Amino acid sequence: MTQEFSTRNKVAVSFSRAKDDMVNLYDHVKFLYQQIALLQKECDRLRFMVGHTKAPADKILVASARGKRVHVSTCPFMKNVKRSSRVVFVSLDQANLKGYKNCSCVKG
Ligand SMILES: [Zn+2]
């Protein structure tokens, strides 16, 4: 009887450990997905800076270095701004932190 209880207990502990491992693993996978998303954004940004416009241009946040507003790169206001005097941002937060206000072309 005691032997059986002990075995059951061991099995229960093993399952509990396996469950913890799964939860842990899930957290790691979630973290990796977040990193992939960030890298994808950074990749889009760099492509845009280099001049490849294959990246979804309406999602790239950009401003004139001397301007006060952040735009999506397809905004008419950005048409006359030279590529060399453009500032590209990874996120709206980054642009806002640097003092740029949102143009109406930027949602949110
Ligand atoms: Zn705009």
Image (cartoon, grey):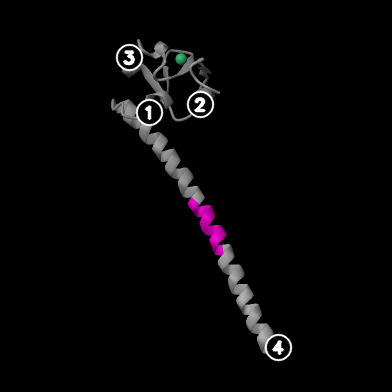
Q: Looking at the image, is 66 positioned above or below residue 17?
A: above
Q: Nearer the viewer, mark 2 or mark 1?
A: 1
Per the image, the residue denoted by label 1 is 56
Q: Amino acid at mark 1?
A: Pro
Q: Nearer the viewer, mark 4 or mark 2?
A: 4
Front residue of 66 and 63: 63
Between discs 2 and 1, the one toward the N terminus? 1
- Residue name at image x 56 percent, y 67 percent: 18
Q: Nearer the viewer, mark 4 or mark 3?
A: 4
Please check the rendered image and state whether residue 46 is part of the magenta-colored stretch, yes or no.
no
Whole-Å distance between the Cαs marked 3 and 2? 21 Å
Q: Looking at the image, is 102 positioned above or below residue 2?
A: above
Residue 28 horizontal/vertical position (percent):
50, 54
Between discs 4 and 2, the one toward the N terminus? 4
Mark 1 is surrounded, within 10 Å at the Cα level, by few (under 14), some (14 to 19) or many (20 or more) other residues, namely few
Q: Amino acid at mark 4?
A: Thr
Front residue of 98 and 10: 10
Front residue of 12 and 80: 12
Q: Quadrant of the N terminus?
A: bottom right
Per the image, the residue denoted by label 4 is 2
Whole-Å distance between the Cαs marked 3 and 1? 19 Å
Per the image, the residue denoted by label 3 is 82
Stretch of the chain drawn in magenta: 21-29
Per the image, the residue denoted by label 2 is 92
Mark 3 is surrounded, within 10 Å at the Cα level, by few (under 14), some (14 to 19) or many (20 or more) other residues, namely few
- Secondary structure, mark 1, is loop
